[in-house]
Amino acid sequence: MVVGPVELQRFAKLFSRYKLKFLAKFIDYIIRLVFGCWFPHTVVVGKGLVLGYGGLGVVIHKDAVLGSFVHIDQHVTIGGNGTKFGVPVIGSNVYIGAGAKILGPITIGDNVKIGANSVVIRDVPSNVVFAGVPAKFIKNIYIS
Protein backbone atom coordinates (compact mmCIF):
# COMPACT_ATOMS: atom_id res chain seq x y z
CA MET A 1 0.00 0.00 0.00
CA VAL A 2 1.35 3.42 -1.00
CA VAL A 3 0.77 6.20 1.50
CA GLY A 4 0.30 9.62 -0.06
CA PRO A 5 -0.94 13.00 1.10
CA VAL A 6 -4.61 11.96 0.89
CA GLU A 7 -4.11 8.97 3.18
CA LEU A 8 -2.02 11.00 5.63
CA GLN A 9 -4.65 13.75 5.70
CA ARG A 10 -7.28 11.17 6.62
CA PHE A 11 -5.07 9.94 9.50
CA ALA A 12 -4.62 13.53 10.68
CA LYS A 13 -8.38 14.07 10.56
CA LEU A 14 -8.84 10.92 12.66
CA PHE A 15 -6.35 12.19 15.25
CA SER A 16 -8.19 15.51 15.33
CA ARG A 17 -11.50 13.76 16.02
CA TYR A 18 -9.92 12.07 19.03
CA LYS A 19 -8.70 15.42 20.38
CA LEU A 20 -5.07 14.74 19.40
CA LYS A 21 -4.76 18.07 17.60
CA PHE A 22 -0.99 18.22 18.06
CA LEU A 23 -0.55 14.97 16.10
CA ALA A 24 -2.98 16.17 13.44
CA LYS A 25 -1.04 19.41 12.97
CA PHE A 26 2.24 17.47 12.98
CA ILE A 27 0.98 15.30 10.10
CA ASP A 28 -0.07 18.46 8.22
CA TYR A 29 3.58 19.55 8.33
CA ILE A 30 4.83 16.08 7.37
CA ILE A 31 2.61 16.29 4.27
CA ARG A 32 4.09 19.72 3.53
CA LEU A 33 7.67 18.53 3.97
CA VAL A 34 7.47 15.16 2.20
CA PHE A 35 4.99 15.88 -0.61
CA GLY A 36 5.44 19.62 -1.16
CA CYS A 37 1.76 20.43 -0.78
CA TRP A 38 -0.43 22.15 1.80
CA PHE A 39 -3.41 19.89 2.53
CA PRO A 40 -4.48 20.45 6.15
CA HIS A 41 -6.59 18.01 8.16
CA THR A 42 -9.42 20.58 8.43
CA VAL A 43 -10.29 20.36 4.72
CA VAL A 44 -13.62 18.56 4.20
CA VAL A 45 -12.98 15.83 1.61
CA GLY A 46 -15.35 13.36 -0.07
CA LYS A 47 -14.32 9.89 -1.15
CA GLY A 48 -12.15 9.19 -4.18
CA LEU A 49 -9.95 12.30 -4.09
CA VAL A 50 -6.92 12.11 -6.40
CA LEU A 51 -3.95 14.46 -6.16
CA GLY A 52 -1.96 14.17 -9.37
CA TYR A 53 1.82 13.73 -9.02
CA GLY A 54 1.46 13.20 -5.29
CA GLY A 55 -0.01 16.66 -4.76
CA LEU A 56 3.16 18.46 -5.85
CA GLY A 57 2.66 22.20 -5.37
CA VAL A 58 -1.01 21.89 -4.40
CA VAL A 59 -2.29 24.42 -1.85
CA ILE A 60 -5.75 23.94 -0.35
CA HIS A 61 -7.23 26.39 2.17
CA LYS A 62 -7.99 24.92 5.58
CA ASP A 63 -11.74 25.69 5.24
CA ALA A 64 -12.21 24.40 1.68
CA VAL A 65 -14.81 21.72 0.89
CA LEU A 66 -14.15 19.07 -1.79
CA GLY A 67 -16.85 16.68 -3.01
CA SER A 68 -16.43 13.05 -4.01
CA PHE A 69 -14.24 11.92 -6.91
CA VAL A 70 -12.36 15.19 -7.33
CA HIS A 71 -9.11 15.03 -9.33
CA ILE A 72 -6.62 17.82 -8.66
CA ASP A 73 -3.49 18.06 -10.81
CA GLN A 74 -0.16 19.55 -9.70
CA HIS A 75 0.36 23.22 -8.72
CA VAL A 76 -3.33 23.96 -8.09
CA THR A 77 -4.39 26.59 -5.54
CA ILE A 78 -7.81 26.42 -3.87
CA GLY A 79 -8.28 29.29 -1.45
CA GLY A 80 -9.31 32.82 -0.64
CA ASN A 81 -8.88 35.82 -2.90
CA GLY A 82 -7.83 38.40 -0.32
CA THR A 83 -10.79 40.70 -0.93
CA LYS A 84 -13.87 38.68 0.07
CA PHE A 85 -14.26 36.42 3.08
CA GLY A 86 -14.76 32.74 2.20
CA VAL A 87 -13.24 29.89 0.25
CA PRO A 88 -14.36 27.60 -2.58
CA VAL A 89 -16.80 24.73 -2.28
CA ILE A 90 -16.14 22.14 -4.97
CA GLY A 91 -18.77 19.63 -6.07
CA SER A 92 -18.39 15.97 -7.03
CA ASN A 93 -16.83 14.51 -10.18
CA VAL A 94 -14.66 17.58 -10.78
CA TYR A 95 -11.36 17.64 -12.67
CA ILE A 96 -9.03 20.57 -11.97
CA GLY A 97 -6.17 20.94 -14.46
CA ALA A 98 -2.54 21.67 -13.65
CA GLY A 99 -1.79 25.16 -12.38
CA ALA A 100 -5.42 26.21 -11.99
CA LYS A 101 -6.36 28.73 -9.32
CA ILE A 102 -9.81 28.60 -7.71
CA LEU A 103 -10.16 31.68 -5.56
CA GLY A 104 -12.73 33.25 -3.28
CA PRO A 105 -16.12 32.33 -1.88
CA ILE A 106 -17.33 30.49 -4.98
CA THR A 107 -19.07 27.21 -5.74
CA ILE A 108 -17.98 24.74 -8.41
CA GLY A 109 -20.86 22.48 -9.50
CA ASP A 110 -20.82 18.73 -10.12
CA ASN A 111 -19.36 17.13 -13.27
CA VAL A 112 -17.10 20.09 -14.09
CA LYS A 113 -13.74 20.29 -15.83
CA ILE A 114 -11.45 23.24 -15.08
CA GLY A 115 -8.76 23.80 -17.70
CA ALA A 116 -5.05 23.96 -16.93
CA ASN A 117 -3.77 27.34 -15.68
CA SER A 118 -7.30 28.74 -15.43
CA VAL A 119 -8.17 31.36 -12.83
CA VAL A 120 -11.68 30.75 -11.51
CA ILE A 121 -13.12 33.71 -9.60
CA ARG A 122 -16.86 33.19 -10.07
CA ASP A 123 -19.37 30.38 -9.56
CA VAL A 124 -19.30 27.51 -12.06
CA PRO A 125 -22.54 25.65 -12.82
CA SER A 126 -22.71 21.85 -13.10
CA ASN A 127 -21.92 19.89 -16.27
CA VAL A 128 -19.62 22.40 -17.96
CA VAL A 129 -16.03 23.00 -19.02
CA PHE A 130 -14.48 26.28 -17.80
CA ALA A 131 -11.04 27.56 -18.83
CA GLY A 132 -9.03 30.72 -19.32
CA VAL A 133 -7.85 33.75 -17.37
CA PRO A 134 -10.29 34.64 -15.99
CA ALA A 135 -12.07 31.33 -16.53
CA LYS A 136 -15.17 31.38 -18.70
CA PHE A 137 -17.68 28.91 -20.08
CA ILE A 138 -16.26 26.74 -22.88
CA LYS A 139 -18.89 24.04 -23.44
CA ASN A 140 -21.51 21.85 -21.82
CA ILE A 141 -20.79 18.29 -20.75
CA TYR A 142 -23.63 15.95 -21.58
CA ILE A 143 -24.07 13.11 -19.08
CA SER A 144 -26.06 10.16 -20.35
Image (spheres, grey):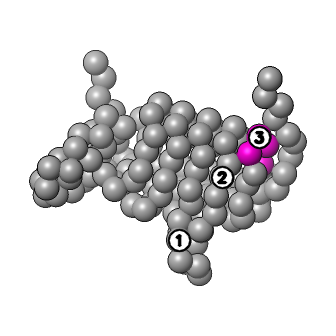
Residue 108: mark: 2
Would you say 10 lies left or right of 15 here? right
Disc 3 crowd rating (10 Å Cα; few below 14, some 14-19, many 20+) is some
Give x and y (percent) for residue 33.
27, 48
**Residue type at mark 1?**
Gly
**Residue type at mark 3?**
Asn
- Residue 47 vs 18, above or below: the answer is above
Q: Quadrant of the N terminus?
A: top left
- Helix, strand or loop status at disc 1: loop
User: Earlier along the polypeptide chain: callout 3 or callout 1?
Assistant: 1
Give the quadrant of residue 35.
top left
Give x and y (percent) for residue 97.
64, 42
- Helix, strand or loop status at disc 2: strand
Residue 127: mark: 3
Please name the residue that numbered disc 1 is placed on. 86
Give the quadrant of residue 95.
top right
Residue 6: mark: none
Residue shown at the point (23%, 40%) measured from the top left: 11
Give x and y (percent) for residue 144.
80, 23
C-alpha span from label 3 to label 1: 24 Å
Magenta span main SS: strand
Q: Nearer the viewer, residue 58 or 6?
A: 6
**Residue type at mark 2?**
Ile
The reply to whether discs 2 and 1 touch (Cβ–Cβ < 8 Å) is no
C-alpha span from label 2 to label 1: 14 Å
Give x and y (percent) for residue 53.
47, 33
Disc 2 crowd rating (10 Å Cα; few below 14, some 14-19, many 20+) is many
Would you say 73 lies left or right of 26 here? right
Residue shown at the point (39%, 53%) measured from the top left: 43
Residue shown at the point (58%, 79%) measured from the top left: 84
Q: Which residues are magenta?
A: 126-130
